Amino acid sequence: MRLANKIALVTGASRGIGHATSLLLAQEGATVVAAARTKKDLDELVERIASRGGKAKGVICDATKAADVAACVNEAIRAHGRLDILVNNVGIGGYRPFLDWSEADYDRIMATNAKSTWLFSKEAIPHMLAQGGGNIVMVSSVAGLQGYPSEGIYCMSKFAQVALAQSLDREFYKQNIKVSLVCPGGVETHFAIGDGRTHGGPNMSGFSTAEDVADAILLAVTPRDRSRVVNVILRPMNEMT
Ligand SMILES: NC(=O)c1ccc[n+]([C@@H]2O[C@H](COP(=O)([O-])OP(=O)(O)OC[C@H]3O[C@@H](n4cnc5c(N)ncnc54)[C@H](OP(=O)(O)O)[C@@H]3O)[C@@H](O)[C@H]2O)c1
């Protein structure tokens, strides 16, 4: 098991990529603190991990609220004494012509995707510094590497995560905090059907799976003494680069 004795906090864990990542990290021996807003889904996830012999705890948290985020990280520290891995996965999408977006849409998307990443990192890093290191993964997107039409605000929020990842990597790598960017293209989740990146209707058969992205996240957080994974781009087989 690659993550024995590690404590991992996964945001947006109630479904999709965060759910698959929680299952995989637990399977690799990590104790998972699974954060999201929907208790029922978190309870099911924790039960499923327990039924496979793993360890997990659900924490209800609105990732846009500083007090919730602080309470979530504090709960992980209170229960386990350390935090080795933070997966900043929570996110919402948006696909609509540029002129149709409102200020409320902007605030919601930026808060959920960009601000939450800053809040969780800010709460986690002091603990990682105190314990001598850790891993932070930003689940951004290919929409954080180039702009796409009708996704302007979403792209802004995903570029912001890339910027923060690069900045934190350069600021903290010497203190053994490894910051990794994972940038998927289309992934078969609720996100892609709802207000996300599905351009061509609900047919997602050519998309990556949430498990594919979880594999990339595991690669990023797998302990290695002499290297860190900086950037992973995951393209589904039906997408150009
Ligand atoms: N699917 C794709 O095509 C795709 C492609 C590239 C990148 N991504 C990125 O991958 C990440 C995960 O996406 P996904 O596809 O797995 O989406 P998803 O299936 O819709 O899951 C999103 C998760 O975020 C949680 N969430 C949303 N708003 C929240 C809030 N305010 N506070 C706390 N939790 C919140 C949801 O849980 P609750 O509703 O229970 O809170 C859910 O667990 C996102 O950052 C997304 O930008 C996705």
Image (cartoon, helix red, strand yellow):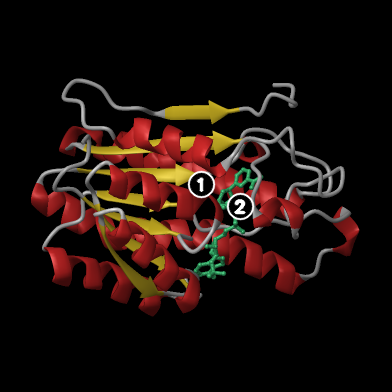
Judging from the image, what secondary structure is the residue with disc 2 in? helix
Q: Residues within 10 Å of mark 2 (few under 14, many from 20)?
A: many
Ligand 1 is within 8 Å of the C-beta of the residue at disc 1: yes
Q: What amino acid type is highlighted by mark number 1?
A: Gln
Q: Is residue 24 left or right of residue 62?
A: left
Residue farthest to the front, as pictured: 51
Q: Taking the image as four quarters, which one is ligand 1 found in?
A: bottom right
Res 157 label = 2
The answer as to whether callout 2 falls within 8 Å of ligand 1 is: yes
The CA span between labels 1 and 2 is 7 Å
Q: Decide if residue 142 is on the left or right side of residue 175.
A: right
Image coordinates of residue 236 in percent, x first then y, are 66, 29
The tag on residue 21 is: none
Question: Which quarter of the figure is the C terminus placed in?
Answer: top right
Q: For the residue labelled by badge 1, is the local secondary structure a helix, a strand or a loop?
A: helix
Name the residue located 81 percent from the left edge and 43 percent from the top edge: 203
For the residue marked with disc 2, what is the amino acid? Ser
The answer to whether residue 128 is left or right of residue 35 is: left
Q: Which residue is mark 1?
A: 161
- Residue 178 image point, x, y percent: 28, 37
| Residue in the picture at 67% in, 55% down | 191
Cβ atoms under marks 1 and 2 closer than 8 Å: yes
Q: Position of residue 119 (x, y in %)?
A: 40, 63
Residue 192: tell me if it is visible: yes
